[in-house]
Amino acid sequence: MYPRGAFGRIFAPGSKATHTKVKEYYQAVNSEPLTAVITNNHLAPTPFESARNYVARIQSDEHFQAINHQLADRSFMAERLERAEQRARASEKERERLEEIVRELELKTQQLRDLALEDVAWELGLHHEEGKWKGHGHIINIDGPKFYDFAPEQQKGSGGAIDLVMHVNNCNVRQAVVWLHERFGEAGAIGAAIAKSRQVTAEIIQLEPRDKFRLPVEDKSKWIEVYNYLTQKRGIPENFVEVLRKRGLVYADAQQNAVFVMRNLSEEPQALGAFLRGTRGENNTFKGYEKGTKRREGWFYFRLGGQPTSPVEKVVLLKSPIDAVSFAMLEYQRLGDVPPNRTLYMAVDNPKSLPVEQLQNIPNVQVAFDSDDAGNAAARATKELLPQSKRLKCKADDWNQQLLDYGQQLRQQQQQQQQQEQDDELSL
């Protein structure tokens, strides 16, 4: 926005400057220097002139207008010059920053690119003849990143700069890297090493057999202890513990751990992990994952409500398997039945393991992590991944403690009711 003194006085409605012609304006601006105008006696007060009349005369005087316009223009131009200099300085810094980014990207790109085998062959002392690289008893054909040696004593091939150096120089990997560094510098040697590692990694991925996850071996003799822990110490209803066991979702291992089976979300779920909760002793705090568990691909979960074939309409995310079961039981006791719509209860102890793709189109996602700082942070991270999710907070430290508190309240109510009934019988 231009200063009012610069152009506002020319076009401002109602001002005397409105009637000033553009040509006259520029003549005024470019007129005699300010010092000459200031010393002009026309601006000096006349004898017996009142202050009001003096101000009115000065404001209407063309010399005063010239000073006013010149000052405004000079201030405006100085401001524009300062802004231009600031933009220039900022542009220069931005240019330097972008140039540095480009240099870093070029270096990284160079390091990620293997050396051209033709250049390596030339440095190895081979000469190109009839489409082959010959010398030192080798007849090598190069095809992009691969090479093959047709010499009668060789008859083998491979790929990459390091392998070519190892083949021709009959050396090991370390010696080949040093040789490349001496001729192509650090960036070239690093690029060749990265390409070699990619090649080895691809071969391992393609050829190495996968170990299938194995659940801990079940020990049925330890089930009664695990069952008592879940029902008595954790307050989970006995019939639901049996339901989970019959579904193969929880059992006991030889260490008397409660094994919660973690499965994928496919139509035919497969066990890809297990969460273990120690139950032996009074204050057992052991908990962890079985070795080989795929935490990003398997979860402890179960469905309740609706029809077995109905799609899931609501998902409740909780920190642990015991919390998931506890929350479901609290809902069951609150509703007096299973949920009317198909609901999935899932244990997710970290947002990194969220099955976002499977949950992103489910409209009702409830995040029921603990109410502490860690739980709140996990809920915020989940909100970023699943914007439709809603936060639920428990009244107690966790949902299992809330289930225990609720059970205690029910028992107290039952005792009071029984006592009331006994008092009523005695009063009869």
Image: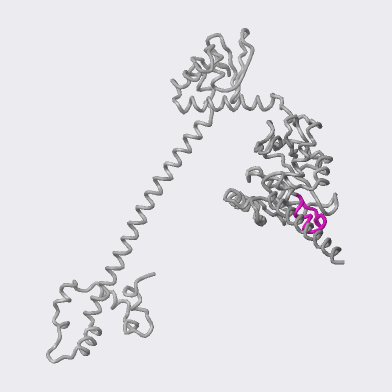
Q: Is residue 216 above or below residue 353?
A: above
List x then y, in percent, for residue 71: 25, 72
Q: Residue at x 25, y 72 (%)?
A: 70
Q: Nearer the viewer, residue 303 or 99?
A: 303
343 left or right of 100 in image = right
Magenta stretch: residue 357 in it?
no
Q: Nearer the viewer, residue 109 or 290?
A: 290
8 left or right of 350 in image = left
Q: Hey, which quadrant is residue 274 in on the image?
A: top right
List x then y, in percent, for residue 389: 67, 55
Q: Is residue 252 above or below residue 138?
A: below
List x then y, in percent, for residue 353: 66, 42
Q: Residue at x 38, y 83 (%)?
A: 13
* Residue furthest left in the image: 47
Q: Residue at x 49, y 32 (%)?
A: 110
Q: Is residue 289 above or below residue 188?
A: below
List x then y, in percent, for residue 378: 61, 49
* Residue furthest top in the image: 153
247 left or right of 371 in image = right
Magenta stretch: residue 337 in it?
yes
Structure colour scheme:
one colour
- Give the extent of the magenta segment: 329-344
Quadrant position of the C terminus in the picture: bottom right
Quadrant position of the N terminus in the picture: bottom left
